[in-house]
Amino acid sequence: MPLTFSLIEKAVNLATKVFLAVRTPSSGGDSDQLQLVSIIDDVSKKIDSLAKGFAGELSYQLEKQQLERLSSQAKVVKLALEFGNDAMLGTAVASISEQIEYSRLRMNEGKHAWFGPWMIAESVRIEALRIMANSPRAVEVVERETVKFRLHILDHVGGMIIGATESPWSKISDFVEGRNEDILLSLANVQALQGSDVPTGSKSGANNGWRNKVEDFFEAEEAPKAAVWPFPVSSRS
């Protein structure tokens, strides 16, 4: 599946908003909810666009179907957010879990372009769980699943983040502990980084240099050794 850098940006943007909603559930009220609705709508349209690009390619038909299902479930969650109807979400959570597993299997095969769809699916699932959480026990489950999501992100792209971030361990600690999502800027915000292969001050070239590095990583058939997360934190007790 071909990577589009904008899909990674949108996936990171959605995940960041969901992480914030879990951390501070009552901070923004309706405005945050409307923002999430808008972002989910945006990513579902992007996935639709990506799926349409597979129209004539038989080898991508299964992947096309999985993308279409992901988009469909994202739209269900969006509609539930708009209606304030928690009952609509149960089926969506069960269905989107299939897309999460499919995406993870593809990433395990070295198809790193599935990182964006996986991140979107996990974000939508956690947002749906957050909305449905109506007891302290349910809230604990949401928080646990959110931590697992954070750790799985690091398992996949932690090595690349370390190589592109100043004071990475401090920022990784903040991310794992749920204090902020600043470290995700190294995936989404190309304006914030300087590429090592261009002269200092060449902003456009630096942005393109980092963008190319991210795209090369996600398009690689096998993850470069330097990009492998050195300590698989999700396996820790």
Image (cartoon, helix red, strand yellow):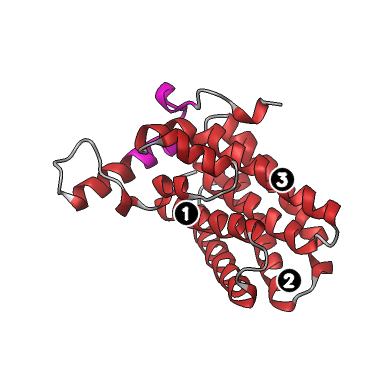
Closer to the N terminus: mark 2 or mark 3?
2
Image point (27%, 49%), residue name:
207
Q: Quadrant of residue 138?
A: bottom right
Q: Which residue is mark 1?
A: 7
Looking at the image, residue 236 lies above or below residue 30: above
Q: Which residue is mark 3?
A: 145
Q: Give the class, few, some or many, for how many residues have Cα within 10 Å of label 2's Cα (few <14, many ≥20).
A: some
Question: On the rendered structure, is 193 left or right of 31?
Answer: left
Image point (59%, 47%), residue name:
178
Between 46 and 199, the one nearer to me in the picture: 199
Nearest-to-viewer mark from 1 and 3:
3
Q: Which mark is residue 80?
A: 2
Between 46 and 68, the one nearer to me in the picture: 46
Label 1: element kind: helix
Q: CA distance from mark 2 to mark 3?
A: 21 Å
Looking at the image, residue 147 lies above or below residue 224: below
Image point (25%, 40%), residue name:
195
The percent position of residue 86, horizontal first and vertical second, equals: 80, 68
Q: Give the class, few, some or many, for how many residues have Cα within 10 Å of label 3's Cα (few <14, many ≥20).
A: some
Q: Which mark is residue 212?
A: none
Magenta span includes 227: yes
Q: CA distance from mark 1 to mark 3?
A: 23 Å
